[in-house]
Image (cartoon, rainbow, N blue to C red):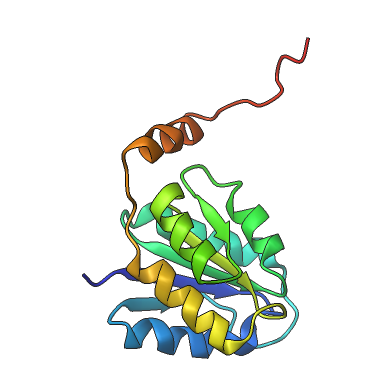
């Protein structure tokens, strides 16, 4: 089943963006590039916002965010209600975040994973479906806005 992906990076993730777009297309999916258009310095929260807004507006779509480590993008993306962004470093984390967390945004760092690992991460994320079941209850709690530590005594 073909899926739709939105992709955005910052300057530290720009160098692998074309490679990731080609991977997604070769897997039979559609990908829309939300920038930037060069490796000039930009602020990752601006591009995380563009991507997450597109994913929220286009129900059933997914996002891919790339920066130097993936950490900044994942933090920024997870500030958006309805986004479940996962920082992945390998096939296993990409597969499990789709199966158990129903992640709708994949994050990784250009500076911490090579092209072979990127290929594995993208393939696993794109091909894995959410299992539902007991995991759906947990996702429901996340979506309801669970409050940790609000009443510590």
Residue 124 picture location, percent across and down: 42, 71
Q: Is residue 75 left or right of residue 25?
A: right
Residue 106 picture location, percent across and down: 51, 64
Up/down of 113 relative to 22, above or below: above
Q: What residue is shown at x 54% (from left), y 81% (from top)?
A: 118
Q: Residue furthest right?
A: 153
Q: Residue furthest front?
A: 92
Up/down of 146 relative to 99, above or below: above
Residue 54 picture location, percent across and down: 43, 60
Residue 92 picture location, percent across and down: 51, 65
Up/down of 130 relative to 113, above or below: above
Number of marks in picture: 0
Q: Is residue 64 left or right of residue 76?
A: left
Q: Is residue 37 left or right of residue 138?
A: right
Is the N terminus in the top left, top right, bottom left or bottom right quadrant? bottom left
Q: What residue is shown at x 42% (from left), y 89% (from top)?
A: 22
Up/down of 140 relative to 122, above or below: above
Q: Residue furthest top?
A: 153
Write down the quadrant of residue 140 in the picture: top left
Q: Nearer the viewer, residue 121 or 73?
A: 121
Is the C terminus in the top left, top right, bottom left or bottom right quadrant? top right
Q: What residue is shown at x 66% (from left), y 75% (from top)?
A: 10
* Residue 53 seen in the figure: no
Q: What residue is shown at x 54% (from left), y 55% (from top)?
A: 85
Q: Residue furthest left?
A: 1
Write down the quadrant of residue 48 in the picture: bottom right
* Residue 116 seen in the figure: yes
């Amino acid at each position: 089943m073909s899926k739709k992906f939105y992709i955005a990076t910052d300057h530290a993730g720009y160098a692998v963006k074309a490679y990731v777009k080609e991977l997604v297309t070769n897997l039979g999916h559609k990908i829309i590039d939300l920038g930037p258009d060069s490796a000039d310095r930009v602020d990752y929260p601006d591009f995380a916002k563009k991507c997450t807004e597109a994913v929220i507006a286009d129900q059933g779509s997914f996002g891919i965010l790339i920066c130097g480590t993936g950490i900044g993008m994942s933090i920024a993306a997870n500030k958006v209600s309805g986004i479940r962004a996962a920082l992945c470093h390998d096939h296993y984390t990409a597969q499990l975040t789709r199966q158990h967390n129903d992640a709708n945004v994949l994050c990784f760092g250009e500076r911490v994973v090579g092209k072979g690992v990127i290929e594995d991460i993208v393939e696993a994320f794109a091909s894995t479906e959410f299992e539902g079941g007991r995991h759906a209850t947990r996702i429901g709690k996340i979506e309801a806005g669970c409050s940790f530590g609000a009443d510590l005594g």
